[in-house]
Image (cartoon, rainbow, N blue to C red):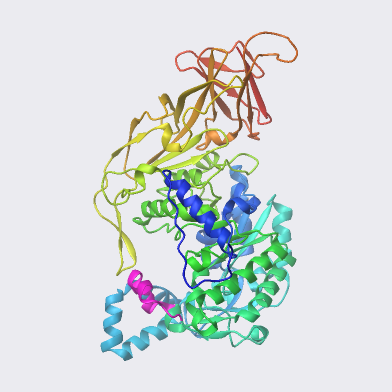
Amino acid sequence: CQLDCWDSALCLAVAPDPFEAIRSVVANAANASPGFRTRYHKAVPEAANLFGWCTWDAFYHKVSPGGIMRGLEAFEKGGVIPKFLIIDDGWQTVRRRIPFSSAATRFLADKVMQWVPATLKDFVSKHAPWLYASLCLLSSAAHFCYRLGSIHANVKFSGFDRGDALASCFVEDERRGFKGVVAAIRARFDVRKIFCWHAMAGYWGGLSDETAGLRKYAPAITKWRLEPSIVAAEPALRHDALTVNGVGIVPPDKVASFHGDMHAYLSGCGIDGVKVDVQSAIGPHGEAFGGATRLTRAYHDSLEESVRRHFDGDCIACMCHSSDDLLHLRTTNICRASDDFFPDEEASHGAHIMAVAFNSLLIGEIAVPDWDMFWSYHKHAKLHAAARAVSGGPLYLSDVPGFTDFDLLRALVLADGTILRARLAGRPTRDCLFASPLQDGRTVLKVWNNNDFGGVIGAFNVQGSRWNKARQKFYKAGIEKPNTVSIAPKDAELPQGSTSGEEGGGTDRFLVWSYRQKRLSEQAWGESEEHLIQPMDFDVFTVVPIIESGGVQCAPLGLVESMMNGAAIIESVAMAPAGAGGGASAGVEARVRIRPASDRRTFLLWAESRPKRAGVAFQYEEATGICRVSLTGREEELTFEW
């Protein structure tokens, strides 16, 4: 039954398949609750299938129209244009907590609470209150304490003749130049979707209570009420800049008006959707508004209704991992799966990939998991790229203009700007669920997913990172070394003995293609083959069933240049007598329906014997059984005859 509320609830599922158990328990919880729906009952935004670029790690708060145009021009020169753009933090009009603070003060304020360990801050707060008060005053200059000063874009976005100076974003400007900026981007580049970032509360520090134009939303400056369990997990939150300075929260009866007005403005400027951040920061303010769940529900109801009305449901939920947030995602169907990609924190990258994979066990049943942006020219770019490829989620970079690895990009993106995305959420394989791919020194993280035909397994040697709770940072544990991983078709959760041709015969044999080694092996469903993975390295294995019909065995492998080569196959190979229905000839015909690559790529098909003819030119390797087809980019179906 479905209830509006309950005092307590436990939903439990038991199944021999751990992934089915999770799927079942989330589905039953959704059926019993009016608050959320599973991903399978929500529309997937088009942006999930488009290659994107986010401005955050490219510019941070210094984003400007000129910078965006330079970035898109750099992609254009490289031959791959993002079809999806996120204008991240830096476009809004915000107010400083300390109007006279200098750039140096802001830098120190942004770093002071991070540099000083929580234990030392505890000591200072107890034994040197005057010093702690000074630290708190300094922290109020941090960017995370700024509050929204207007629902309109700042002066930087009034045109293309403004500078990139950070100071310009603090000038309140009511001109509607943002509409012209968006129109200029669309006129110059073929960008299908443009999203804007904003925090759930408007900005990191909420709304300013000192701005006349925002008083109709009645923002109230409130401070978090942190549960002891939260503080135990994150001691630094006791002294977080927002903890000590408060947030301008719009009350539940006004938040629909606020979200609606801001989204109406953005929609009127030509924006297609929003990335809504800092969602889990709403609940801790609930004590002043009837409780955390009541406040969170009001914000999510308001957000999703406004997004439905103004953006046709296009939204990315970010930093929304509290139960109150996840269980209120009724229509939102892209959800960030972990903390940020931190390009400068060397020890964070392996931990990031492990976290998004394990978090997707739950999040991937509620929404399409977003494993976050990354830099394509980073030291660990290929590792991150492979993780995004098998994630089943969106793919977007945050490259600084002029610093893009286009060879890597072409392994992820087709020429028309779309990506080859798996059907499900990437999750750890069964043998990794209760192992420690980050800290036991031996386990290679394996992430599985399914395509329309076959499956995929990503293998990531991310051993060696650990979390320092006091310093709020990852550090290297010194246990990095090459590790061996066993890959079997069953790891991709493909059913055993289910492959068949039109005549109904299954082979129970699979082909496993290594992206890094460019090597093919034939394996039974439960048969393993070992591979050596170097520290902070990876491989991606495509797994496809062998189809047998009329004494002929074959299997399509997909686009050889792509990490997700198997995702190019839309429909399984269908085997039938060649010329069936017309009586033209005897024999066997294989048909493969594929996604048009939109550029010249190489398609691979394995066949036990050389085809007599095909609808396209091909080369057959007798030693490996591989047929290589050079595509023009327009093909939608390939046929082979024996």
Side of 282 where 17 appears, left or right: left
Please tell me how many numbered marks the rendered image carries.
Answer: 0
Above or below 556: residue 24:
below
Residue 129: x and y, percent? 31, 90
Side of 411 where 342 appears, left or right: left
Residue 559: x and y, percent? 55, 31
**Residue 206 shows in the view:** yes
**Residue 278 shows in the view:** no
Q: Quadrant of the C terminus?
A: top right
Above or below 357: residue 230:
below
Front in this rendered view, residue 347 or 65: 347
Q: Residue visible at 49% across and 56% down?
A: 363
Residue 269: x and y, percent? 73, 66
Q: Quadrant of the N terminus?
A: bottom right
Residue 629 figure quarter: top right
Q: Which residues are magenta?
A: 224-241
Is 230 inside the magenta-drawn segment?
A: yes
Side of 404 where 77 appears, left or right: right
Front in this rendered view, residue 487 or 27: 27
Is 252 inside the magenta-drawn segment?
A: no
Q: Residue visible at 50% across and 50% down?
A: 23
Seen as rendered, the residue at the extreme bottom is 130
Seen as rendered, the residue at the extreme left is 478
Seen as rendered, the residue at the extreme top is 585
Residue 393: x and y, percent? 54, 49
